[in-house]
Image: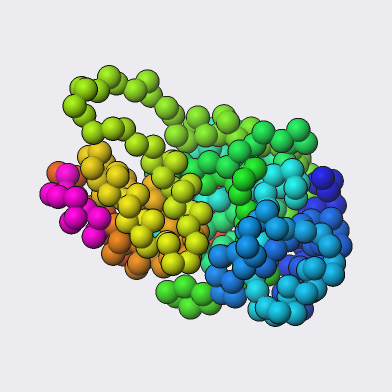
């Protein structure tokens, strides 16, 4: 696993590379495994996704000769030496609010890098725990995802095409001291406390896990994404989950799989129409909201 101080320099140099292929080689040469993702997107181009990530320079060069504009994927956890707190901003969800509360509670100190994302959100990088065990998870209502073991991130200087056009991932701030591992379990308990489940009548629809459904949706390949999202949304609708909560739970995963915000919204609405009358709680519209700038957000939260 690459040392934290070395990793910080690697990301800073890669972000300044003149080409995506050059940045990919910068990572690989420093011992950070990479794999190609679709140009302008996040979908892996390799047969086994992040499991195919490598530091082999010959393989990395071959991938980017074949796909010169491929974005750069990096597996999170022990393989790369970094874990990432992903602050989402989309539809009705603004993860900066939850990240700010976590900062006040002293739960997100010690970051190495802050990276602005194309959607107006943020990736906060931390050194991975050497022994592993930091599994990926989601706190969708808070607008926070954690990328650890079993996950990956698209990294600077990759560029993503969205409804607002093309935008890059950018290194925004680099920490000069105080870098330390993140206690992701405490952070998860803070963002997404788990109440003791109430007993259900025997004829109640079988309880489903929004978190597991989201993880399953995130892994759908092209050609399966819409159908997978529709199936997962139907399961939540059948369990009486309000549309807004279903959107919060599944939208980040579906976008991670490669669907657009418009496709996600339309598919979830279709699922609720198919399963019957919607619950009393109205669905929040995933229409565009003003996005605060990365500079304002990170300055307010981390000053």
Residue 120 position within the rendered picture, expressed as x and y whole percent measured from the top left: 50, 63
- Which residue lies at the image location 37% right of the left edge and 20% below the top edge? 196
Which residue is nearer to you in this view: 74 or 84? 74
- Which residue lies at the image location 79% right of the left edge and 56% below the top edge? 32
Region in magenta: 269-279
- Which residue lies at the image location 73% right of the left edge and 75% below the top edge? 64
Which residue is nearer to you in this view: 78 or 139? 78
Is 56 one of the magenta-colored residues?
no
Is most of the magenta stretch helix, strand or loop? helix
Q: Residue 209 sits in which quadrant?
A: top left
Is 253 on the left-hand or right-hand side of 288?
right
- Which residue lies at the image location 35% right of the left edge and 67% below the top edge? 263
Visible residue check, residue 298: no
Residue 65 position within the rendered picture, expressed as x and y whole percent measured from the top left: 75, 80
Residue 115 position within the rendered picture, expressed as x and y whole percent measured from the top left: 63, 59
Q: Residue 238 sits in which quadrant?
A: top left
Is 200 on the left-hand or right-hand side of 59?
left
Q: Residue 34 sits in which quadrant?
A: bottom right
Determine whether 85 is above or below 26 in the image. Answer: above
Is 277 one of the magenta-colored residues?
yes
Visible residue check, residue 209: yes
Is 300 on the left-hand or right-hand side of 217?
right
Where's the N terminus, which quadrant? top right
Residue 79 position within the rendered picture, expressed as x and y whole percent measured from the top left: 75, 47
Is 188 on the left-hand or right-hand side of 193?
right
Determine whether 201 is above or below 54 in the image. Answer: above
Determine whether 170 is above or below 6 in the image. Answer: below
């Amino acid at each position: 696993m690459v040392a934290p101080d070395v990793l910080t320099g690697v990301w800073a140099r890669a972000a300044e590379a003149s080409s995506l292929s050059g940045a990919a080689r910068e990572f690989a040469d420093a011992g950070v495994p990479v794999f190609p993702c679709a140009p302008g997107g996040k979908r892996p181009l390799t047969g086994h996704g992040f499991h195919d990530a490598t530091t082999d320079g010959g393989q990395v060069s071959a991938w980017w000769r074949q796909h010169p504009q491929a974005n750069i994927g990096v597996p999170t956890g022990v393989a790369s030496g970094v874990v990432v707190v992903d602050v989402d901003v989309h539809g009705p969800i603004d993860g900066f609010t939850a990240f700010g509360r976590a900062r006040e509670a002293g739960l997100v100190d010690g970051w190495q890098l802050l990276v602005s994302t194309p959607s107006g959100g943020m990736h906060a990088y931390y050194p991975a725990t050497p022994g592993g065990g930091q599994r990926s998870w989601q706190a969708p209502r808070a607008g926070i995802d954690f990328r650890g073991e079993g996950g990956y991130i698209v990294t600077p200087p990759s560029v993503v095409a969205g409804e607002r056009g093309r935008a890059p991932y950018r290194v925004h701030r680099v920490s000069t001291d105080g870098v330390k591992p993140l206690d992701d379990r405490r952070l998860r308990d803070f963002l997404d406390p788990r109440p003791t489940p109430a007993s259900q009548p025997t004829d109640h629809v079988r309880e489903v896990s929004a978190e597991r459904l989201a993880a399953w949706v995130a892994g759908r390949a092209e050609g399966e994404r819409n159908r997978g999202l529709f199936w997962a949304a139907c399961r939540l609708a059948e369990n009486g989950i309000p549309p807004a909560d279903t959107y919060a739970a599944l939208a980040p995963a579906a976008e991670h799989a490669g669907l657009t915000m418009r496709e996600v919204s339309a598919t979830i609405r279709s699922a609720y129409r198919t399963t019957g009358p919607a619950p009393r709680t109205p669905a929040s519209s995933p229409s565009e909201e003003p996005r605060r700038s990365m500079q304002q957000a990170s300055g307010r939260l981390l000053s």
